[in-house]
Amino acid sequence: MKDKNKVSTLLCICVIPNVIAEIKYLYNNEEEAAIREFYKSNLFDKLQNPATGLWHLSPKTLSEIFLSEKKEQKIEFPEEQS
């Protein structure tokens, strides 16, 4: 539970606001619409689960995954680089 709280804090403070900033142009720069759509996405559901490890991806990468989900109706995660 402690890890989930840490990830939730990280998401709320650092990650999600930057993802919203990246995608709000899709919604005529209406931040509320961008937030609503992001929170309805499958990506957001998966992002909340610390076990997925998505929280470590950059906001830019997460916004690209979100855009792909909106376009393709599925989520494709980037390959891990070593």
Image (cartoon, rainbow, N blue to C red):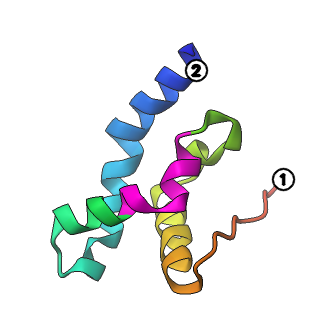
The spot of residue 46 in percent (x, y) is 59, 49
Amino acid type, callout 2: Asp
Numbered marks: total: 2
Q: Residue at x 28, y 61 (%)?
A: 36
Mark 1 lies on a secondary structure that is: loop
> How many residues crowd around disc 1 within 10 Å: few (fewer than 14), some, or many (20 or more)?
few
In this rendering, the answer to whether 79 lies above or below 74 is: above
For residue 23, side relative to residue 2 (left or right): left
Front residue (pair 53, 43): 43
C-alpha distance separating marks 1 and 2:
24 Å
Amino acid type, callout 1: Ser
Q: Which mark is residue 82?
A: 1
For residue 3, side relative to residue 16 (left or right): right
* Quarter where residue 39 is shown: bottom left
For residue 66, side relative to residue 21 (left or right): right
Q: Which residue is mark 2?
A: 3
The spot of residue 54 in percent (x, y) is 62, 48
Label the magenta part by its dominant secondary structure: helix
The spot of residue 75 in percent (x, y) is 64, 69
Q: Residue at x 30, y 51 (%)?
A: 17
Q: Residue at x 55, y 74 (%)?
A: 69
Mark 2 lies on a secondary structure that is: helix
Q: Residue furthest bottom?
A: 71
Please state which of the two labelled residues, at mark 1 or mark 2, is closer to the viewer: 2
For the N terminus, give its image quadrant. top right
> How many residues crowd around disc 2 within 10 Å: few (fewer than 14), some, or many (20 or more)?
few
The spot of residue 7 in percent (x, y) is 51, 30
Q: Which residues are magenta?
A: 38-48
